[in-house]
Amino acid sequence: MTQTAFKAGGAAVVAASPPAGRRVRRSAFQRKLFPYLLVAPAVCYLLMITLYPGVYAIYQSFFFVRFNEWIPAGFDNYVELFQHDEFWGALWNTFVIGGIALTLECVIALALAYYAYRDPLIRGWRIVFLLPMLFMPSAVAFIWKLAFADGRVISDLLMRVGLITENIDFLGVVWNARLTLIVADVWQWTPFLFIIFVAALQAQDKEIEEAARLDGASWSAIFWNISLPLMKPVIAVAVILRGIDITTMFANVFIMTQGTPGGTTETISFFIYRMGFRTFNFGYASAASAVMLILTLIIAQLLLKRFFRSGRA
Amino acid sequence: MAEIELRNVRKQWGAVVGVNDVNLTITDEEFLVLLGPSGCGKTTTMRMIAGLEDPSAGDVVIDGEVVNEVDARDRDVAMVFQSYALYPNMTIYENIRFPLRMRDVPKARHAELVQRAAEMVELGDYLHRKPGALSGGQRQRAALARAIVRQPHVFLMDEPLSNLDAKLRTAMRVQLKHLQRQLKITTVYVTHDQVEAMTLADRIVIMDGGEIQQIGTPDEIYTDPANTFVAGFIGSPPMNLIGGRLEGGSFTAPGIRVDGLGENAGARNAILGVRPEDCHVVGAPAHFNAKIFAIEPMGDQTVVSLSTDGHLVEVRAARDYRAPLDSMAHISFDLDRLYLFDETSGERLR
């Protein structure tokens, strides 16, 4: 195997060098430059679609923008933003909805992983758990909108088993509306955490597990005393990835609640969208985006630092 | 406190047989060593005693009770793993205390018991550290302390010394033996190192290919091997095994003639076994005459390799013995320390 790979590599090098006789000597600088040239197209592409709009948005946040008319605003957008109740409300909603959803996802995924990781069949049917993740976010949102509001499936089911007597107004009551968003998110994203946690549990040292068994520990004692503490860094990474994702929750809000009732399900992404594309206040929306970016970075950094320090053996 | 019995124990995975029909009784307070090359089934045998592996057939009996259906955690067996298997998230104190917590030993006694176990293995100063901050030898002792802290019925050790360097291994070997004598706990010890087996064991069980080859005290194993496998596995350098012809009470092979051997065995092809230290270099032609292939001075002795008929025979000589290569050497054997084995089965001819 190695031999063949080596030969193939050698052949490629030979083919790339100019024919013998007029061999070109490259300077050290040129040789160092070569790898950078190879990745340059990809880097340019990435810069164009991520960095450029980002920088543009931050630049824009210092202007009052009315379509083609840009009026320098200094920090006025930011000042206004920090005095805007709807901004703080959206921040709070994102925190509450995202926080509850993320906590539920973690707890459910950990519980499932704990019961599933010792199962030898798990490798075979792991893919089933992934299915909700493979759906388009908007499709998931429509399904749950049908179930909760338009189709009243949930209310209907609950009435049939006799738990309630009349339709629940899922979109008209603050916590009901938040609950629909939470359920949709938990349904779609628990599998993501489940897969990560199962992988972490399956990767843990079997001898440590066996030693704990012989020391008299039950499976749950092993989980609480050994597996869970050792999983801390994995949990931290998973929570950060999911947490960043959840702060940008948009599709579900847009499709299911539109921020109703009374803006209590308006997440920060939806707030930014509303400022930008409903009131066409682009500078203001950009300012909100910049603030969110900074907030997310700070929180993620704090979490990473904390978990990785305590996770070290 | 504990007697272990294996009755016709067998372990197989599909068509692969790991342990084949092992019968073995381990008496109370005994230090028993399972010895064999890798893949011989010794670790699997131990894991079946621990309950980490279910036997495919046969019974594991501890103190007269068949424990096949008893979970590993309820067998009151402690094990030291080759990798030590310490819990990396806990301090050494918490590691040693873990079995006490899991077995509902009253909290008030924890500190005292942990301290005592740690002092037995001379680890008292490292209790607040985590395993990652300890050296290999210290981790090994921490694993030992964790095993002895709750005074188990049975002690199992799976190559506990093989990750240590040679010097530390020798030191820990002595400690282990002393500790076992002190605690009087039935111990099963798995190793592929014959020196460990010889020095530690009350009895050695030699395994190969999933089967027991011989059970006996270190002396018996060394002086009375049951077959060529045992003879060739024990001893350093190991026993010389020379193929030849046995007829009318004399054994002959190229360069070798020994009379007065195996008179009852009849005429047949046989293997002569002779240990390097039972050979003596003499001045005049003797039992065995061959050319010197190499001379290896070891300090306390000199190992002389003689070439005969394409293979080498190793002989132990005095430490100042020197001779030119390719010169003839004459060897006389201790006649009462020669062993004859059947050529095909490898079993001892008696």
Image (spheres, coloured by chain):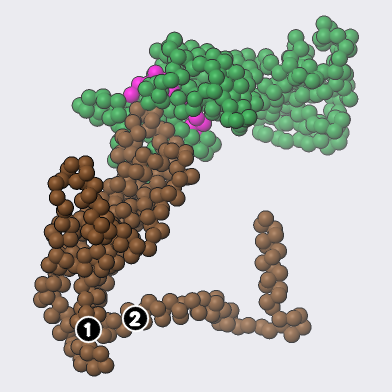
Q: Indicate left or right for B305 with B10 as reference.
A: right
At horizontal 71% and vertical 18% (from top left) the residue drawn is: B227
- CA neighbours of label 2 inside 10 A, class few (<14), some (14 to 19), many (20+): few
> Does B151 appear in magenta?
yes
Q: Which chain is brown?
A: A
Query: Disc 1 residue type?
Result: Phe
Residue B167, can we see it? no
Tell me the SS state at disc 1: loop
Across and down, in percent, residue A130 comes to: 41, 53
- Left or right position of A91 against B161: left
> Against B77, is A230 above or below?
below
The answer, for residue A239, to whether it is visible in the render is yes
Q: Counting residues from the N terminus, which is met first, the one under dot 1 or under dot 2?
A: 2
**Residue at horizontal 36%, vertical 39%?**
A115
- How many C-alpha atoms fall within 10 Å of the one at disc 1: few (<14), some, or many (≥20)? some
Circle 1 residue: A280
Q: Position of residue A84 (x, y in %)?
A: 11, 75
Which residue position is annotated with label 2?
A53
